[in-house]
Amino acid sequence: MQDKTTRNNTIDMIRFITSILIVFIHCPFPGTFGQYCINLGRFGVPFFLIVSGWFSYHPNKDTLLSRLRKKFFDTLKLLGTVTIAYCIMNSIKSVVSGYPPYEWIGTYFNIRHARHQKSLNH
């Protein structure tokens, strides 16, 4: 029997693979190959969430709440970092392409785009 503190590297590898598949949803390849990648990525989302949720669970309520709080703030920090990097990258891309940096903001942060994103999440 394995010790409970031993990390399961197989599960970590599967989580890594499914996270790569999830990236394929957001950065699709063209053609039939791209459709296969998107379909595999759609499998990866629930699998990744189930496995992550399983390992987040702890029978002790105090330990569970402290772990969830820590994971929430860690995720919030990561989201902030990625958002800042994304904004910097798109600003540089706009300048290199000859467009003003604020132009891409108007294409992504508007009511029509928000409605489209909302429709994808239902």
Image: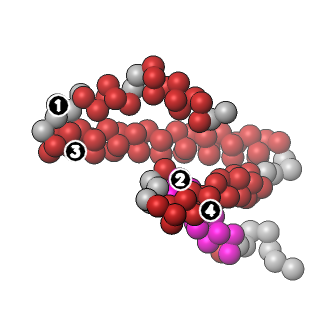
- The part of the chain drawn in magenta is 10-25
Placement of the N terminus among the 4 image quadrants: bottom right
Q: Pick out the residue farthest to the bottom.
A: 1
Residue 25's disc is 2
Residue 100's disc is 1
Q: CA distance from mark 1 to mark 3?
A: 10 Å
Q: Amino acid at mark 2?
A: Ile
Residue annotated with mark 4: 40
For the point 43% across and 38% down, the residue is 80
Q: CA distance from mark 4 to mark 1?
A: 37 Å
Q: Nearer the viewer, residue 70 or 25?
A: 25
Disc 4, disc 1: CB below 8 Å? no
Between discs 1 and 2, the one toward the N terminus: 2
Q: Nearer the viewer, residue 22 or 113?
A: 113
Magenta-colored stretch includes residue 14:
yes
Placement of the C terminus among the 4 image quadrants: top right
Whether residue 7 is visible: no
Q: CA distance from mark 2 to mark 4?
A: 9 Å
For the point 35% across and 43% down, the residue is 86
Residue annotated with mark 3: 93
Query: Which of the two discs, 4 and 1, sits closer to the camera?
Result: 4
Q: CA distance from mark 3 to mark 4?
A: 30 Å
For the point 76% across and 45% down, the residue is 64
Q: Amino acid at mark 1?
A: Pro
Tell me the element at label 3: helix
Between discs 2 and 3, the one toward the N terminus: 2
Q: Amino acid at mark 4?
A: Leu
